[in-house]
Amino acid sequence: MDWDGDAVSQFERVPRHQEAAQQMLDAGTAYKCYATKEEIEAFREQARAEKRPPLFQSPWRDSTDMPDLPFVVRLKAPKSGETVVDDQVQGRITFQNETMDDLVLLRSDGTPTYMLAVVVDDHDMGVTHVIRGDDHLTNAARQTLISQALGWEVPVFAHVPMIHGEDGKKLSKRHGALGVEEYRDMGYLAAAMRNYLARLGWSHGNDEFFTTEQAIEWFSLEPIGKSPARFDFKKLGNLSGQHIRATDNAELLEEIIAYVAAQNGEPFTENQKSVFLSSMDSLKARAKVIPELLDMAYFFLGSRPFVPDAKAAQILDIVSRGMLNRLTSRLRDATWSLENLEAEIRDFAEGEELKLGKVAQPLRAALTGRGVSPSVFDMMVTLGKEETLARLEDVST
RNA sequence: GGUCCCAUCGUCUAGUGGCCUAGGACGUCGGCCUCUCACGCCGAUAACACGGGUUCGAGUCCCGUUGGGAUCACCA
């Protein structure tokens, strides 16, 4: 994420917030309230019992008494009329002022509340547009009131819908809400993440796949929808795969290196890096996330002996091993090029009266110890003659 | 519960009164390709929540119902 200017610490601006509160006190748009928490609680209890809205009505609102007691500073909000939030996403939203209470601006210990602090900070920083989740929609009305009490221009608001979990329930710590670093740890490309998230609730016609540059160029508030979207890992995965395929090899290798470093993995040797680069094309098509890329790279990242997994062991039966032995001796004299190896093995299969797959699968199992991998011909070229033959000999015994 | 907001395929969405027999993408299901897994390609599946209006004409406008969501602190 990029931003302009320096980060501002809200905590360090407490004196400025207090100054703003004093300004409102002087202007008569705020007042000192000496009510205790108990009194407020009692008021609310009674209001609830009488089925009135439990909005606290402070008896100190119009009082001129100034007892020597702890107090909070409250906004003297208008009791009638309405407050309009002209939201760029949600439209024109009207709140009746009688439904809003006199919110606390300064706590009894003199510290500012969030509501006051954001208004003052945004104003001082020259913030023109406030774009945030629609859980802040009602806060927009309150902040509008504070801005007006201070005599300041109200910023442009835009409240974008929230994102729900795959089951449609709201996201929470306990329920699927993950920080961006967790998606990074799962190996999704950042560009894919931006693409996917941008597409959630926002659209640019039928464009599904786009770069960050395109997103920046195309973005505007107007096409943002108003209803919450569900998070869909399947689609994220598909998009991530597309981004992996669209990223050039050198750049992708940098992403992989950064990923491995973040996971505290063993750094690659120079040789591994160069093999990675030359194999990248065949790796790319097979992965949606970086760990899958790493997994497919196992045939050159791992080292002998390659103990067969269950699937490979099943493929490498006694018959296959015998066949592999005959193939191995033939390969000793083979010219090591992609075209020639393919021709050589096809010819061998024909001589054995086997379909290519019947030769390629055991070969794959021998070379990688697995049932799934990139193309055997590609791997043989990448591995080179010596290593290939050594791996074949490993399984022949 | 009060206040506010929302509602098109399973999911993300296009759609701004006639171009909609509702389009795209993901998913799913078939098929092709094929040395495995993928990738790629072809095809299929599937939606305007419901009920009233307004209008010559409604997915598009209005009202209601239902269903979702947000918020109601001396938290941020």
Image (cartoon, grey):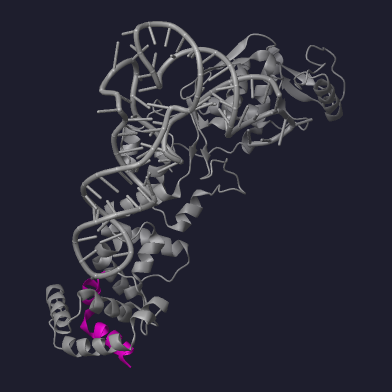
Q: Magenta residues, as a range?
A: A375-397
Based on the displayed image, in which of its 4 quarters is residue A297 positioned? bottom left
Image location of residue A221, percent across then percent down: 41, 27
Against A342, residue A148 (above or below) is above
The C terminus of chain A, quarter of image: bottom left
Report which quarter residue B33 is drawn in: bottom left
Q: Does the magenta stretch include residue A384?
A: yes
Q: In this view, does A35 lie to the left or right of A351?
A: right
Residue A327 shown in magenta: no
Q: Is residue A207 above or below residue A383?
A: above
- State whether residue A369 appears in this view: yes
Pinpoint residue A48: horizontal percent, then vertical percent. 80, 23
* Residue A315: x %, y % from top left: 34, 80
The number of callouts visible is: 0
> Is any part of residue A16 visible from this angle?
no
**The N terminus of chain A sits in image quarter:** top left
Name above or below for residue A307 compared with residue B33.
below
* Residue plotted at (31% across, 37% down): A207
The chief SS type of the magenta part is helix
**Closest to the observer: A35 or B58?**
B58
In the displayed structure, A31 sits above or below B45; it is: above
Q: Residue A10's spot in the image, x, y percent?
A: 61, 36
Left/right of residue A313 with respect to residue B76 in the rendered view: left
